Image (cartoon, rainbow, N blue to C red):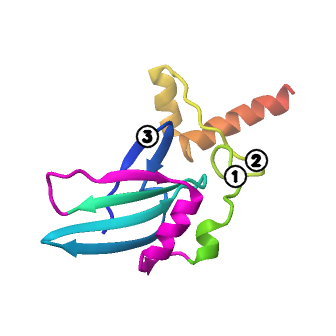
Amino acid sequence: MAIELNRIVKGHRYDTSISILLASDELISNKTQTTTYLYRTRRGLFFLVRQFNDSSKKPKILPLEKDQAIEQFNKLPEKFQDFTEAFSDPEDIHGRPPLFEKPLIKTSLWLKEEMLEWLKKQPGTMSEVIRKLIQDAMDKNP
């Protein structure tokens, strides 16, 4: 079973918990077990995770170019995606996938404690309540 890893390598985030597992294998030699997992991020970056049964060795993330990922995919015996799904161009995403008509962009804000308490008591999520308040204000004052 793959472990969860979340690392930044050369400015790119590689997170197994939100990436797509494409293929894997398990290699046992001289009482050493190495498992290799091939992943694709939702932005279309490919990476290998090498996991060792030896607790003194930490799992490794190895970023790959697309042609290297295709080569690894062809070598790894256990497939979780077909070739077309694994290597088609990713959808252009900006921010969170659309819940409404447009993508959402994550932000943060500072609130007074009483404002936060009020938000928690409202029906729906805090994000939904804040979006509705802003939309209502925009509708009243375009």
Q: Nearer the viewer, residue 86 or 4?
A: 86
The quadrant where residue 65 appears: bottom right
Q: Is residue 105 above or below residue 90?
A: above
Q: Nearer the viewer, mark 2 or mark 3?
A: 3
Mark on residue 130? none
Percent of width and height locating residue 70:
55, 67
Q: CA distance from mark 3 to mark 1?
A: 26 Å
Q: Nearer the viewer, mark 3 or mark 1?
A: 3
Amino acid type of the residue tagged 1 in the rendering: Pro
Query: What is the crowding at mark 1: few (fewer than 14 residues within 10 Å), some, or many (at least 20)?
Result: few
Amino acid type of the residue tagged 3 in the rendering: Ile
Q: Earlier in the sequence, mark 3 or mark 1?
A: 3
The residue singled out by tag 1 in the image is: 98
Q: Magenta segment, which residues? A: 53-81
The residue singled out by tag 3 in the image is: 8
Q: CA distance from mark 2 to mark 3?
A: 28 Å
- Where does the N terminus fall, quadrant-wise? bottom left
- Where does the C terminus fall, quadrant-wise? top right
Residue at coordinates 44% horizontally, 41% vertically from top-left? 9
The residue singled out by tag 2 in the image is: 102
Q: Nearer the viewer, residue 92 or 112?
A: 92
Q: Earlier in the sequence, mark 2 or mark 3?
A: 3
* Label 3 residue SS: strand
Q: Is residue 139 left or right of residue 91?
A: right
* Label 1 residue SS: loop
* Label 2 residue SS: loop
Q: Are the two marked residues, 1 and 2, in contact with CB atoms closer than 8 angstroms?
A: yes
Q: Is residue 142 above or below residue 128?
A: above
Task: Report if residue 59 lies within the magenta region.
Answer: yes
Q: Are the two marked residues, 3 and 1, in contact with CB atoms closer than 8 angstroms?
A: no
